[in-house]
Each structure stands twice: as structure tokens, then as C-alpha cells.
Image (cartoon, helix red, strand yellow):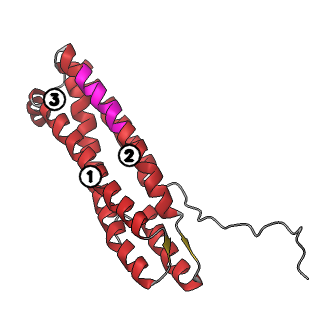
């Protein structure tokens, strides 16, 4: 007879270390801001920066639209997958997840580019344009941060999706670890 008072079996959650992209992104943005503020206060003008300064607001808008578009597209793919496959029950559902993860990984590289260029042009627009454009930049930056936070729970759900098959669990874990720690997919 089985003991009815035995504690429930602990469910194992996948553990992900902080992806290298997160501290790298933060360091990149801080470096961009510090470098541009230094150049701005010393009045040092570099050829390309002088031109970018004149179009900084427009470039920021394009980068922001790019970031939001990629996030919305990836969220849509993940949400559709989760609706169709709440768990990984067979090889086909795992195969269906792979292109979504690949798309997300490639999108992350573009997001880094947009984030770098958007950060540079945001600070340029705030320092070099009128107050209205500066306020628009600040508002759009906050809205983009809110959209990123809105996307994160969907990504977290996929990272902790359940599967009963041990073989599928190992393959799923390898895919998810690649997603978190490598710039390009290896599956």
C-alpha cells in the first residue's frame, strides 16, 4: 500500500543561467551613452556622428519600430505554438518548436543592432533636438520596455514547457540551452 501522506514528487524546472546577451546589452548601452555624452561635452565631432546627429530622431523611430515589430512577431509565433502545443507530447511538436526558436535567435541579433543604434540615436535626439522630440523619444523608449516585459512571460512559458518523454526532454533542453547561450542555432 502506498503512503498517502508522502509529499508530492518535486517537479524539476529547467535552470537557465543569465544569458550572455543580457549583461552584454546593458554594458553596450552604458558604453554608448557614456561615449556620446563625453563626445558631446568635449564638442568632439566625428564625421559619421555629425551626420547621424541630424537624422537621429528619424533613425531612432526606425530602430524602435524594428524592435517592436520583431517582438510582436516572435510573441505571435510563440503564442500560436503554445496554443497548439501546451506540452511537448511527441517528436512532431518538438520539430514544430525548432523553427520558432531559430527565428527568435536570429531576431535577437537584429534586436541587439537596433538596441545599439537606437540607444545612440536616442541620446543624440534628446541632446540635439527640441524638447518635443526628446519627450517623444522618452515615451517611445518606455513603451518599448513595456512591450519587452509583456513578451517575456510567453518566452518563459516555452522555456518551461513540459514533456513526459525522457528522450524528448533531453533534446528539448539542448534546444532551449542553445537558445539561451548561443548566438546561432545548432539544431
**Of callouts 2 and 3, the N-terminal one:** 2
Magenta segment: 135-145
**Viewer-proximal residue among 84 and 90:** 84
Number of numbered discs: 3
Q: Is residue 141 magenta?
A: yes
Q: In the rendered view, does 160 fall on the left or right side of 24?
A: right
Vertical placement of 71 versus 143: above or below?
below
Are the two marked residues, 3 and 1, in contact with CB atoms closer than 8 angstroms? no
Q: CA distance from mark 3 to mark 1?
A: 20 Å
User: How far across and how far down the image is residue 130, in percent?
Assistant: 17, 15
Q: CA distance from mark 2 to mark 3?
A: 21 Å
The numbered mark at residue 177 is none
| Residue under numbered circle 2 | 25
Q: In the rendered view, does 109 fall on the left or right side of 155?
A: left
| Residue under numbered circle 3 | 57
Residue at figure coordinates x 91%, y 83% from the top left: 1
State whether residue 19 appears in this view. no
Helix, strand or loop at label 1? It is helix
User: How far across and how far down the image is residue 89, in percent?
Assistant: 50, 79
Vertical placement of 153 versus 130: above or below?
below
Residue at figure coordinates x 21%, y 46% from the top left: 66
Q: Quadrant of the C terminus?
A: bottom left
The image quarter containing residue 108 is bottom left
Instruction: Identify the main secondary structure in magenta.
Output: helix
Residue at figure coordinates x 43%, y 43% from the top left: 149
Q: CA distance from mark 2 to mark 1?
A: 17 Å
| Residue under numbered circle 1 | 70
In this rendering, the label closer to the viewer, 2 or 1: 1
Amino acid at each position: 500500500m502506498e503512503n498517502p501522506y508522502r509529499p508530492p514528487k518535486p517537479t524539476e524546472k529547467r535552470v537557465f543561467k543569465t544569458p550572455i546577451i543580457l549583461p552584454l546589452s546593458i554594458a553596450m548601452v552604458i558604453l554608448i551613452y557614456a561615449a556620446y555624452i563625453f563626445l558631446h561635452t568635449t564638442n568632439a565631432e566625428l564625421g559619421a556622428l555629425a551626420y547621424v546627429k541630424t537624422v537621429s530622431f528619424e533613425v531612432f523611430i526606425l530602430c524602435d519600430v524594428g524592435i517592436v515589430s520583431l517582438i510582436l512577431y516572435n510573441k505571435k509565433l510563440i503564442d500560436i505554438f503554445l496554443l497548439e502545443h501546451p506540452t511537448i507530447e511527441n517528436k512532431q511538436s518538438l520539430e514544430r518548436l525548432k523553427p520558432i526558436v531559430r527565428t527568435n535567435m536570429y531576431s535577437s541579433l537584429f534586436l541587439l543592432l537596433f538596441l545599439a543604434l537606437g540607444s545612440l540615436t536616442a541620446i543624440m535626439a534628446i541632446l540635439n533636438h527640441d524638447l518635443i522630440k526628446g519627450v517623444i523619444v522618452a515615451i517611445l523608449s518606455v513603451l518599448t520596455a513595456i512591450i519587452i516585459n509583456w513578451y517575456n512571460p510567453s518566452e518563459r512559458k516555452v522555456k518551461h514547457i513540459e514533456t513526459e518523454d525522457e528522450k524528448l526532454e533531453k533534446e528539448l533542453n539542448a534546444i532551449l540551452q542553445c537558445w539561451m547561450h548561443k548566438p546561432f542555432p545548432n539544431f
